[in-house]
Amino acid sequence: MNPLISGVRALAGLRAGAAAAAAAAATVAMTMLTAFAAAPTARADAPAIPDFTDSHGLTRVVDATEVRSETDFTLTVTTPQVSGPHKIRVFLPEGYAADPGKRWPVTYFLHGGGGTVDDAAAVPALRSDKMITVVPDGGLKGWYADWVMQNTAVGAANWQTFHLEQVVPFIDANLRTLPGKDHRAVVGLSMGGYGALRYAEARPDLFGHTAALSGGIDFGMPTIRAAVVATELNLTGAWCAVSTSTPSGTGACTGYGPYVDSDAVFGSPYPVFGADRVWNAVNPAASANLARLRGAKVTLYTGDQGLIDSVTAVATRTVKSRLDQLGLPARLVDYGNGSSLSPTCDGGHNYGCWAPAFADYIPRLEADFAAADAPA
């Protein structure tokens, strides 16, 4: 204010009062803005996902939930069975929210060694509008097993218990799933191919459908035992470099995590005085284990090119031959160099082959799920 204006004292008093009122108003406004900003429910455009309740030994890390859309989100959970927080990615069918009275079949996808739940993004066919897809973390080298050693650098490692006794009932408790094995599948690739076949054998009451792609599914083969040991020792080499994929399809792999004892997962791999008894007991290719698949729909895929699939091809053919001997039907897609499967497939151990293999498999699985719903 120009100091020459008369009545300066009166105006100064008015000015002070106005300033105090303005300050009070600003304080109120800031309080309201802070409260508004702190309230996450105020975002009208935030995607809505189903509510999940802790159960079956799983505790959610609520602040860690990743929501990409209402049909694609990732939960983070903790459990005493497996050290550390672990992710569970979920793909819902587009019609899930719109039809609250409908229940859906479920497929569990098991990623490969060195991979994560986000590897599923490299397989577009898994985003089906006819089923729920669940992708649980399997660890960089979890091998979908309850480890013999629980005191290694990775801590508690009861992966099979985590998946079969916790994740499956947790999903059934929180999502509108269809009950019964005819509406539940377990599928996987590489290390996850082993997991898929092994889980179907271990729990035939849970899974009526299984598919193993380029799986390490015959522990009778020294080369496959050596591959498991390599992951325990974090020897990446070619196995890790091409056994997984980022969503961008680069095939990058950072390793199998910390070094652990070579006997950590399944005990001694050497067939001396029965030291390898655990390997034999959990071998998916063992006839006694394959016999547990009676009544299940079994599908096997493999190429035969490169360091890894030249081995998985032998394992897969052995499993198919033994299933035939047991009189158990199974579908084998042995795509060799990949030319019969897709232009992106070179017959090797990569998503250029696995993505089109799933594109072939998922519609068949959807049809089987639909047939299970059809009136008798």
Image: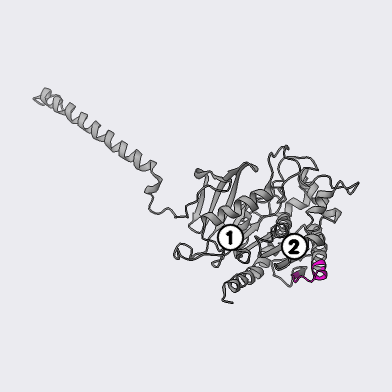
Question: Which residue is at a point 17% across and 28% down the rendered structure image?
Answer: 17
| Left or right: where 95 falls relative to 119 | left
* Sequence-first tag of 2 and 1: 1
Q: Does residue 346 show up?
A: no
Question: Which residue is at a point 63% across and 71% down the rendered structure image?
Answer: 368
User: Dot 2 lies on which element?
Assistant: helix
Question: Which residue is at a point 77% across and 64% down the rendered structure image?
Answer: 291
Question: Which residue is at a point 21% across and 29% down the rendered structure image?
Answer: 20
On residue 292, the disc is 2
Q: Which residue is mark 1?
A: 133
Q: What distance separates the C-alpha of mark 2 from that of mark 1? A: 24 Å
Which quadrant: the N terminus? top left
Image mark count: 2
Given residues 162 and 192, the one toward you in this image is 162
**Labels 2 and 1 touching (C-beta < 8 A):** no
Residue 105 pos. (x, y %): 57, 64
Amino acid type of disc 1?
Thr
Residue 268 pos. (x, y %): 84, 45
Give, as a single range, the part of the protein colored magenta. Answer: 321-333
Amino acid type of disc 2?
Arg
Q: Quadrant of residue 329?
A: bottom right
Residue lying furthest bottom in this view? 376
User: Which dot, 2 or 1, sits closer to the camera?
Assistant: 2
Residue lying furthest right in this view? 273
Is 37 placed above or below 221 here?
above
Residue 177 pos. (x, y %): 54, 61
Residue lying furthest top in this view? 9
Residue 110 pos. (x, y %): 66, 56
Within 10 Å of disc 1 (Cα), the crowding (few <14, some 14-19, many 20+) is many
